[in-house]
Image: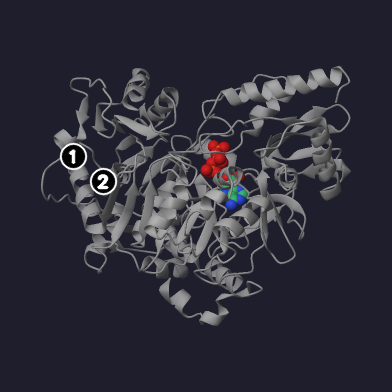
Amino acid sequence: MADLVDVLPTEERIHPNGNLIRELNERSLKDPDGFWHGVADELFWYEKNGPAFEATKEPPYGKWFERWKTNLCVNCLDRHMTNGMKNRVAYYWEGEPGDRRPTPYAELSREVTRFAKVLKDLGVRKGARLTIYMPMIPELPIAMLATVRLGAIHSVIFAGFTAKSISERVNDSKSKLVITADGAYRRGKVIPLKPIVDEALKDTESVEKVLVVKRTANPIEMQEGRDLWYEEVAPQGNVYVEPAKVEGMHPSYILYTSGTTGKPKGATHSTGGYMTWLYFTQQAVFDLKDTDVYWCAADIGWVTGHSYIVYSPLLRGTTSIMYEGTPDYPAADRWWQIIERYGCTILYTSPTAIRMHMKLGEQHAQKHDLSSLRLLGTVGEPINPEAWKWYYKHIGKERTPIVDTWWQTETGGILITPAPGIALVPLKPGSATYPLPGVDADVYMDDGTVARPGEKGYIVIKKPWPGEFMTLWNDKERFDSVYFSRFKGVYYPGDYAMKDEDGYFWLLGRADDVLKVAGHRIGTIELEDALIAHPAVAESAVIGKPDAIKMQVPVAFVILRPGQKPSPQLRQEILNHVRTTIGPIAVPDALYFVEKLPKTRSGKIMRRVVGAVVAEKPVGDVTTLDDETSVEEAKRAYQELKAQIAAGKS
Ligand code: ATP
Ligand code: MG
């Protein structure tokens, strides 16, 4: 990697046409074995036998580092004990109540070894599955690193999930051990976690031990013979635990996707390919310097946190910020205070968080010195150009580039993004720009032909890349059918997309959410962008309502900005705005004003739930829903407008 970046003269880092990125991409695709061998050489391996990459006949059509041996934890920690980084801070951790704990690499390494010793003494061995259900405290990454040190496989469950979600995942992975905490802080309150685990374990059979870390000191019950306090069993002083030497294709973890679209899928990641991909992308995307203080403000419970809070920053010896709580507690400026306090240089977050800050107002950011920031990033959903501009103007102060990174739980790491660590291309708000080296992305039409520039279709990845998931845990059949059968021989991510005249990729939302209106396909995101561009609108969700003549008609749910009042006039004004910006075909058939929208626990809008409300059908599986009252809110708005129309008032 270093040589790839260093060969570029600084003046050429801003390359208007992105030719350089595309050349590097072509080079990597022509010789995947040579290219990734070169990157992997910068990491630590016990053995390097055979090729870095070999093509296979079965999905996912390739194997990475199959006969190489390594250990992910050793690469994240032990490696830094002798390369001059041991005294560098790994995490500036800040708890929601305001407690702070900076942890240098050497200390993190000691903590992880202590944790690994406890796991080893409990019988955890290579290949065993462990479920982790914890708040955003340092012991969460510590537990993950200790697990992979032993060659065991973690399944981290976001600490907002219910008992049912836990038992479902524990049963699928057959975990023998659960690691949890007594409780978590959220908006100043203590949320007990251990009782949720107790409830979940009533429906599981595989779990033998529960290890509990103390965080909130709320009273909990400990089951004799099963439950242990971590503090009581942790060894004192220095210990050493031999790392497991694992093969490149040994699973590092299972992560169940958030399930916006149904039953959770256990994406299973490798060790060698995954590690190499993260090591490469962290530098390519964030262009890290020794002085950086990097903050990925996600939760470790999601893939963004696994890859870009835990593994990739540690692989690179980065100094990160890790924050336990909610962005608006105790006040709306909490994030901006944290950025100022630690001199944060890189902020990586989601469009949903940006829209939330936008709604709260820029005055909160203005109270703090954000001049340390030099790069901003987003992930998780398409970013509306309005939100992009707000982020650029009020947080980046029109100085810092924004990397809009497109990827998925399944892809392990970022695939399409501006890459200032290689060469920054001119940005277009709403486009993730070009695929990284190693990513053979394209857009296909329904019939499998390649879309022309400007034509909308489905994004596909035509060749394996190192970070690609290996399978779905326990479900190879579903792996093949969901991801590799829509178009023969290529990976199908399930997102709607377009490539423009400059070869820039625009990700337009989930393929399942695309509307078909009188023969036209409209991505929900195009309509939502238009709605959010209206000054009164803070957030929106567009869905297709079944229609006898047009097949589907768009309907929109809208949250107004603070100070705006719903009225039939405002409704008409917003609809007119859509008519003039996209065209008459896209004008929603109905527009509902709501106070909140149904979202997943990771903050993504669940359009299928809103769709069920207007189709007057049952809303279905809502275990991933964050706030159930949002469904009632959608129903209320729907019924209200229906009654008004019936009365001829709207
Ligand atoms: P599930 O697969 O269970 O329904 P999910 O898809 O929300 O859950 P993730 O893997 O976290 O779970 O999210 C990946 C999806 O998020 C992508 O497929 C895409 O739809 C969306 N996404 C992520 N980043 C971007 C981005 N930069 N631009 C547009 N969409 C994005
Ligand atoms: Mg998905």
Task: Tell me how far mark 2 sits from mark 1, CA to CA.
Answer: 9 Å
Numbered label attached to residue 118: 1
Left or right of 200? Residue 78 is: left
Please state which of residues 503 and 36 is positioned toward the viewer in this rendering: 503
Residue 648 in picture, x, y percent from top left: 89, 20
> What label does residue 415 carry, if any?
none
Q: Quadrant of the N terminus?
A: bottom left
Q: Is label 2 in a helix, a strand or a loop?
A: helix
| Neighbour tally class for label 1: few under 14, some 14-19, many 20 plus, Cα within 10 Å | some
At horizontal 85% and vertical 21% (from top left) the residue drawn is 645
Q: CB of residue at label 1: within 8 Å of ligand 1?
A: no
Q: Provide the secondary structure element on which disc 1 rests.
A: helix
Which quarter of the picture shows residue 340? bottom left
Question: Which image quarter is the C terminus in?
Answer: top right
Pointer 2 with pointer 1, Cβ within 8 A: yes
In this rendering, the answer to whether 421 lies above or below 444 is below
The numbered mark at residue 146 is 2
